Image: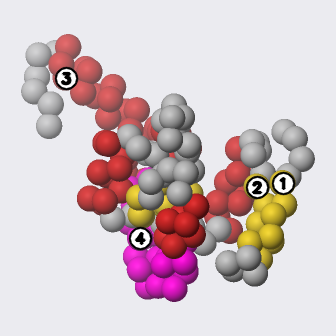
Amino acid sequence: YGPDVKKYCPHCDKKVTFHGYVPHSLMAAYLVKSDVVVNSLVRKAAQSIVSKIGDYLASGHPMINTGLDPEFWGKVEQDGFGINVEPEDPEKLAEAIRMLMENPEKCAKMGKIARKIGEEQFDRPHSYQKIVDMVSELLDGKETK
């Protein structure tokens, strides 16, 4: 997994640790203890993994999204569970983090929405069953809802 990279953040006077890849159980533990989750991508990266997004939303914290996928960018805005920030812009990312930390009520509201969206739309057993049901209805010649 490689060593953790520890940095000092001059903006918040805190040590920040970038863990890189960690096992799922450790990642989930970090997400639960976080204040904000960041879907951090570089501009030309392949888009984020859907299961990771589901885990982030299930944590019940607001999300800062730096991915450029138009569908997910719109979902963040329309559903209201986070903030979109252009990738590779550390100043805008820091500004978004500061804004959330200075607005605990907004943070809590976004977190509740995130959790709800995670449960309803990204819970794999639940969402996969919906897909199975839709395919079954199509094969049976019925219309889907």
- Does the magenta-highlighted stretch encompass residue 113? yes
Q: Name the residue tied to disc 1.
A: 5
Residue 31 lies, with reference to residue 22, above or below; the image says below
Q: In the image, residue 4 lies at what x, y percent? A: 85, 52
The amino acid at mark 2 is Phe
Is 26 positioned to the left or the right of 129 in the image? right
| Labelled pair 1, 2 in contact (Cβ < 8 Å) | yes
Marks 4/3: CA–CA distance: 35 Å
The amino acid at mark 4 is Met
Of marks 4 and 3, which one's residue comes earlier in the chain?
A: 4
Residue 111 lies, with reference to residue 57, above or below; the image says below
Marks 2/4: CA–CA distance: 24 Å
| Labelled pair 4, 3 in contact (Cβ < 8 Å) | no
Crowdedness near tag 3: few (<14), some (14–19) or many (≥20) residues, C-alpha within 10 Å: some
Of 25 and 12, nearer the camera is 12
Q: Name the residue tied to disc 2.
A: 18
Q: In the image, residue 85 lies at what x, y percent? A: 44, 58
Of marks 2 and 4, which one's residue comes earlier in the chain?
A: 2
Q: Name the residue tied to disc 3.
A: 137
Q: Name the residue tied to disc 4.
A: 110
Quadrant placement of the C terminus: top left
Is 90 positioned to the left or the right of 27 in the image? left
